[in-house]
Amino acid sequence: MDIVFDAELWVWDARRADTWTFVSLPADASDEISDLTEGSRPGFGSVRVRVRVGATTWTTSVFPDKARGCYVLPVKRAVREAEGLHPGDTTAVTLEVLTRPA
């Protein structure tokens, strides 16, 4: 399952000094991922994904964010540097869920 969306990069307030940067998945995509992976997520609800932003592809996990009501995707520094992205920029994201349903 591929999910394609545009999202704005934002910095996690709790770790601002470390510049942990994320994008939020759309609510409908988050609901679809949650339904697809029901029963197969670890305790805190992470889901393994393969992501493409621009020409860069990597494997990571998305995490549920109760405050935002959706999954969030960390965008590591190497990706941001390779793609010339900064917090506040909007980028196209293609995400493939790797976790198999239970």
Image (cartoon, rainbow, N blue to C red):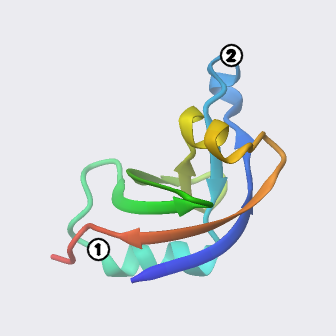
Q: Say what amino acid the circle numbered 2 marks.
A: Ala
**Considering the numbered disc 1 on the image, is that residue within a helix, a strand or a loop?**
loop
* Residue reaching furthest to the left: 102
Q: Say what amino acid the circle numbered 1 marks.
A: Glu
* Left or right: 9, with 43 as reference point: right
Taking depth in this image into account, of 58 and 21 the one nearest to the observer is: 58
Residue 92 place in picture, x, y as percent: 68, 67
Residue 54 numbered mark, or none:
none
**Considering the numbered disc 2 on the image, is that residue within a helix, a strand or a loop?**
helix
- Residue occupying image coordinates x 52% and y 78%: 3
- Residue occupying image coordinates x 34% and y 48%: 44
How busy is the neighbourhood of tag 2: few (under 14 within 10 Å), some, or many (20 plus)? Answer: few
Residue 45 place in picture, x, y as percent: 35, 55
Mark 1, residue position: 38
Mark 2, residue position: 17
Q: Quadrant of residue 11?
A: top right
Q: Nearer the viewer, mark 2 or mark 1?
A: 2
Residue 97 place in picture, x, y as percent: 36, 71
Residue 89 place in picture, x, y as percent: 82, 50
Q: Relative to 92, is 65 above or below?
A: above
- Residue occupying image coordinates x 63% and y 23%: 15
